[in-house]
Amino acid sequence: MAQRGQDKRAEEQINSRLSDMAQRGQERRAEETEEQRNSRLAVMAQCGQEYCFRIHGQIYHRTSHLHPAEAGDENTNTTHFYNIITHIRHLCM
């Protein structure tokens, strides 16, 4: 009877260790996925495609030209950054 109790405790410890190892593996894969995604976004920005950036965990996409000469008569740059600042103020309240 005592032997069965010891065997059961040993099995529970092994299962607990295996569970911890599996969880660490999942976390590691999640980190690798985030690193790969960040790398892809950096490459996209260098290639002149869509540019993304993150503020307080929120992902923003550049929707207008950052240089006034490229924008022509548009003045969307100011509006875009005003919206971001408004969003940050909302998060801080």
Image (tube, grey):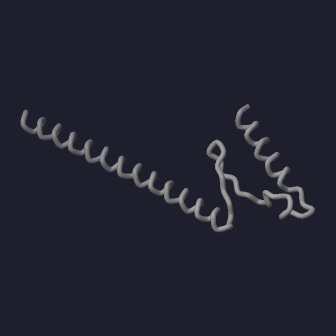
Q: Quadrant of residue 76?
A: bottom right
Against 29, residue 70 (above or below) is below
Left or right of 25? Residue 75 is: right
Q: Position of residue 68 (x, y in %)?
A: 85, 58
* Residue drawn at point x = 80 percent, y = 52 percent: 80
In front of the other: 62 or 17: 62
From this viewpoint, which residue is outermost toward the front? 69
Q: Is residue 62 left or right of residue 73?
A: left
User: Vertical placement of 71 versus 1: above or below?
Assistant: below
In which quadrant is the N terminus drawn? top left
Name the residue located 55 percent from the left edge and 56 percent from the top edge: 38
Q: Position of residue 25 (x, y in %)?
A: 35, 51
Q: Is residue 89 placed above or below 60 in the rendered structure?
A: above
Q: Residue furthest right?
A: 73
Q: Residue at x 66, y 52 (%)?
A: 53
For the image shown, how many numbered marks are present on the structure? 0
Quadrant into which the C terminus falls: top right
Residue 31 appears at what percent x and percent y?
Answer: 45, 51
- Rendered location of residue 67, percent (x, y): 81, 58
Horizontal side, residue 36 vs residue 9: left or right: right
**What's the residue at 82%, 46% (across, down)?**
82
Query: Picture quarter containing residue 40?
Result: bottom right
